[in-house]
Each structure stands twice: as structure tokens, then as C-alpha cells.
Amino acid sequence: MAGLEKLFYPSSIAVVGASKNPQKIGHIILKNLKEYGFKGRIYPVNPNADEILGLKAYPSVSAIPEPVDVVVVSVPAPKVPEVIEDAGKAGAKFAVIIASGFREVGNVELEKKVVETARKYGIRVLGPNVFGYVYTPSRINATFGPRDVIPGGVAFITQSGALGIALMGTTIMEGIGVSAIISLGNKADLDDADFLEFFEKDPNTNIVLIYMEGVSDGRKFVEVASRVTLKKPIVVIKSGRTEAGARAAASHTGSLAGNIAFYEAAFKQSGILFAKSIEEAFDWVKALTWNPLPDGDRIVIITNGGGAGVQASDTLADNGFLLQKPPQSLVDEIRKFVPPFASLNNPIDLTGMAPTEWYYKAVYAALNDPGVDSIVVLYCHTAMTHPVEVAEAIINAVKDAGGLKKPMTVALIGGIEAYEGIKKLTEAKIPAYPTPERAAAAIATVHRYVKYREYVKKRLSYLEEEKRLKRSLFVQH
């Protein structure tokens, strides 16, 4: 963790290529850094300016009157080596290289020169070909992406620049708080595993989301990821799963996407949750971030439509979880207010006539029942009740029950009104989705992570006991 300390907790950051032109990347990075509230010292570097955005500008990094911890380099690729040389002489510790035009376009020698120059001075390099980085605990937004990133517990590592910037916006829209956003680019020096090692011990990070095209050192990545997943979930979106995708990845960041079977095996071995799409990854992240972990596998589905309940049941079964009979205490509680023909076998079907108060009572009862480990709530929009009112009933049940004491996901199924209800639940940090399958898959992912962790801990405990017995036998003889 100490190796990256000054990248995430710097006293000063210089932006080389800072500009007065609002259309220039160097201007946007400087503005984001200043307006997001970085408390350290910010130094624009531009030989043709005395001041930019109210900050004194310097002609070079070496002209700055103190050693700078982080240098963000936003100049054309051919000029990068001389900037690194100058930064090295000035005592810089990290270089974040925004420029593209290196290995990803066949310019391998230029990239090698940058890395060699950096190593000569002990500078660690993030990039090249990146959009910058964010660390919300230090109020750092050194990117040319959206400014107002929501602070939270998700560390997002991305190998794609443009997609990464777009997904920054997605985190804001979905209300997902982040601890960090790291653009890896070509990974000429620092890579996924280096940042995983930091986030493993980072108290501000609870979950790691990675958009990956390829890894340069698979053994190192699996070794580090295997440690991290015992403490925090890792969700990976792996692109380049097909031959066409692999070719696109190679032309994009110069990355070798590799055989997808190898990645799937490595992810399974290390406990990584492998998402096949961006939508799936964000579904899982919401469920893992906003929920506690379950104590067991007793999942209950509450619905007003039999079909929705069947779809959710199938999805849970596809993920290895078969529904059990609900606890009699919960059945007895719900039987007090539903019609006699309501099926309470699991899925618990409140019937299509269910008003908001039935949802409130059912969710409240399930949250408080010790025989329930997690809950999937489904609502099919009918003329009986508006989805926003159902969302409010669920939110109130959670509040009155003392919060989400166990994992829960919700699906509001319907048209635009259902999306209004989803928005309301999202604002309350309750994971909500537009289909029963997505709600069920998200809760199943939370359970899959817990089962993996339990399996590994039991395995480690068994190996430790085996070692102890061998030592005991050795002493006896």
C-alpha cells in the first residue's frame, strides 16, 4: 500500500500542458482538480502562461519551488520523455501520462523510452493513453471526465479511456459512490495488480470493479486477486471474449486479450465475479455495495405476479440456488392480510390485487424474520397501485425495520412509471431493477461471493489443521 501512498495522498500535483483554452484536455483536468476541491497545492505548467484559472503557472516542473508528488502529463506523445526527464530531476514520484500515440499504435520504442526515463528517477507511471485518475477521500479528480463524482466505496479500474469516462457518468446517474477511478491505458508500468494491492488495504474501498481487456502478468494478478476477494468482492468485465473483440482490444490499447477460457478459469480460481456485460456488472455492484452480506442461503421472493416469481426462481436456480419453503413465522404473519387463495409457498404471491400496505407489511416482516437470509421483491405494475407508491412503501418498511439488515433487491416491472419507482429506490440506496431476472441475478451474486469466501476459509482452516497435526506427529516421534 505504501508504494502508491503519494499517488493517492499527494501534497502537490502539477498539470503539464495546462491551458487557458477551455477546449484543451489540460484545461479540463486543471479545472476538475481545482473545482473538485483538492486540498494540496496545484501547479499548472505551461511556458506560455503566467497564470491559469487563478493559479500561478510555471514554465517547467523543475521551475516549481518544491518537489511535486504527482505530475499529470497532457502534452503530445513525442514531448513526453523530456517532460519525464524534467520531472525526475525535480523529484517527482508519479507521472500520469494522458497522451496517446504509443504502443497502441505501434510506437513501442517511444513507450520504452518513457518507462526507462521514469525508472532512472524512480518515477512510477500510470499510462500512457489514460484519462487520469480520481481518489475521492483526497478530493482528487485529475481527469477530463465528469467533475462531480459521488464519494463512496467502489474502486473502478478501467483499461478503456472513452468507455471509462462514460462509466464515470454512469456511476453518477446510478447513485453509486466511488473511492477511486483509475484509467490504466497501456499499463506500461503500473497495472491492475498494483492497484488491487493498494485497494486490498484501503479502508475507503469496499468493492473493486474492473473493465479489463488483458493482463500482462496473469500469475501476479491471480495471486493478488485471490487475497483481495477474501476481504472485498472484485467484479470484472472482460472484453475481447471473441476473436473479433480480441482484435479490437489489440488495436485499442495494444493489449493481448488472451484466451477467454484461461480468464474464466483464473477468475473462478481467485473468486472474481465475472460479468458478461456492463449492465450486469453495475447490477451486481449495486447489490454488493448497498447490501450487507447474508448469513445463509434462505432466499424469499415476494411478488404480486406468479410469472415474475417464476422468472426470478429460474434465475436463482441457474445460479445454483433453489428456493426453500419460507419460515412458518413469515407465512403466518403474511396470512393475516392476504386473501385465502394467495400462494405463500415461495415465491410468496401477494396476488395482483396487492395494495401498497401489503408490500410494506410483507417486506417489514421478511426483514425482521430470523428465518430469512435475503429477499427479492417483485412488483408488476397494475391499475391497483402506482409503482412509485410501492417504492415508497418498500423504503418505509426498510426504515422502520432499522435499515437493510439483510440483502434485498427489488424489480419494478412496467413502463415509465416503473422507472420512476426504480429511481426513488435507487436514491434510497435500495438496489432496484426493471426485470425479475436482473433482481434475482444480483442477489444470487451476493450469495455466490459469500459461498466462495466461506469455501476458501474452510479450505485454509483445513490446511492449517493438517499442518498442525503433522507438526504434532513429528514432535511425538
Image (cartoon, rainbow, N blue to C red):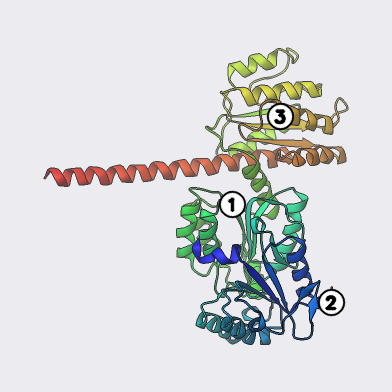
Give percent across and percent down for residue 157: 62, 61
Q: Residue at x 54, y 44 (%)?
A: 449
Q: Mark 2 highlights which residue? A: 21
Quadrant location, the C terminus: top left
Dot 2 falls on a residue whose secondary structure is loop
**What label sits on residue 399 in the rendered view?**
3
Say whether residue 434 is visible.
no
Give percent across and percent down for residue 463: 32, 46
Q: Residues within 10 Å of mark 3 (few under 14, many from 20)?
A: few
What's the residue type where badge 2 is placed? Asn
What's the residue type where badge 3 is placed? Lys
| Viewer-proximal residue among 193 and 33 | 33
Q: Residue at x 85, y 29 (%)?
A: 382
**Nearer the observer, disc 2 or disc 3?**
2
Q: Residue at x 69, y 52 (%)?
A: 151
Q: Is residue 198 above or below residue 45?
A: above
Kindly indicate the quadrant of the structure image that contains residue 109.
Answer: bottom right
Labels 3 and 1: the sequence-earlier one = 1
Q: Are marks 1 and 2 in contact (CB under 8 Å)?
A: no
Q: Residue at x 79, y 31 (%)?
A: 392
Dot 1 falls on a residue whose secondary structure is loop
Labels 1 and 2: the sequence-earlier one = 2
Dot 3 falls on a residue whose secondary structure is helix
Q: Residues within 10 Å of mark 1 (few under 14, many from 20)?
A: some
Disc 1/disc 2 C-alpha distance (Å):
35 Å
**In the picture provided, is 268 more to the left or to the right than 317?**
left
What's the residue type where badge 1 is placed? Thr
Say whether residue 263 is visible.
yes
**What label sits on residue 205 in the rendered view?**
1
